[in-house]
Amino acid sequence: MDVNLLMRENVQNLAPYSSARSLNIGADLVLLDANENPFDVYGRYPDPSQRSLRMALSDYYSVDFDRVLAGNGSDELIDLLFRAFTEPGSSNVVVPQPTYGMYDVASSLQNCNVRKVLLNDDFSLNVDRLLAATDGETKMIFLCSPNNPSGNEFLTVEIEKLLRSFNGLVVIDQAYVDFSSGTLWRNRISEFSNLVVLQTFSKAWGMAALRVGFMFADPQVIDVLVRIKLPYNLNEVTQRLVLERLQNSSVVDFRTKVVKEERSLLRTALQKMKMVNQVYWSEANFVLVKFFNSNLVFNRLIDRGIVVRNRSEEPLCENALRISIGKPTENRLLIRVLEELDAELNQNVKLEV
Ligand SMILES: *Cc1c(COP(=O)(O)O)cnc(C)c1O
């Protein structure tokens, strides 16, 4: 795959904004180059090349520095991929359905055509169908694994087949990888020049409010995105808080373990309920559940002040609710409310007989 051929034409020739602060800031320098306020702790612009943060990510995940980049949420990185690699009006991307809605939004914003391809009924990938949907104008295939909203992971051999057969970027969004026991695609980044892996601090790392996502990719891909991103896309406070959290990751490990235990507990409880049609396997911090009447369940939960995500309008998701794993007390409350409703419904059935 030739990254230059894949790039949007005007991006190939783009001269990036040259920020005043491209050199490393030493402690002893007199900084009179950026019209900053010298009196305030927050007076200085953050490092546009995110050296400390990328270095820390590179260390933590054992991936080369030039293969890592952070964004203002992975949503920014998704947006940058479209700006860098799709030509408005003529390019297309292939996206399995159902999945995370942001690929569609970012694509439409750049006037790029989204070719939606259904997953199989069990939410597994249909590689042949995906490849059949590609043509010479297909720049990227987006795979969310573990997939939102279904929770399953796609088979490694199938993704490998896509990586080998498709002459464009295969973007694997691993926002939920910390909850899963499957493939860590970041470890395979040097094997495939067309592999892009997205991760985020918004889920297991508990920092959604701060907006930090990160990407692993071929150095050429990273380089393009560095050139087109806003120079100060990550604020200094956020960068520092993320650095701190990377040094105290044991709290993340502990909470992730709790979430996985709670996930298993919730699945077991749901499987016993008669109003439940199917509880899907999950490698994420949510569970997709098909009920016989999802609206009834959804409304009851709302009545009791519990908000879950109604996915019943999504393809293959008829009568499905996506339930995030909360704190243990919240999950107990959820289970109690659901068991109550289940008992009521059973009672009614018996009365009718
Ligand atoms: C939650 C989520 C993200 C996170 O996006 P951020 O912008 O990093 O908060 C990314 N991808 C998927 C599939 C998600 O569900």
Image (cartoon, grey):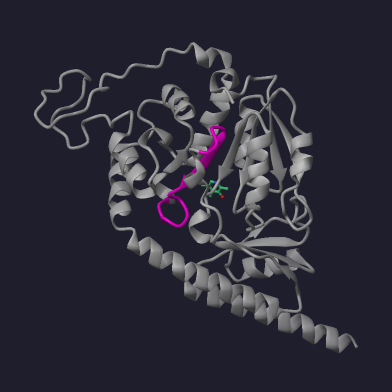
- Residue 226: x, y in percent? 42, 26
- Residue 59: x, y in percent? 33, 46
Residue 7 covered by magenta stretch: no
Q: Quadrant of the N terminus?
A: top right
- Residue 289: x, y in percent? 69, 65
Residue 197 covered by magenta stretch: yes
Compared with 284, 337 (above or below) is below
What secondary structure do most residues of the magenta stretch adopt?
A: loop
What range of the chain is rendered magenta? 191-207
33 or 146: which is nearer to us? 146
Q: How many marks?
A: 0
Q: Residue at x 40, y 16 (%)?
A: 16
Give the quadrant of residue 78: top right
Compared with 192, 282 (above or below) is below
The furthest residue to the right = 353
- Residue 227: x, y in percent? 42, 22
Q: Residue at x 51, y 67 (%)?
A: 326
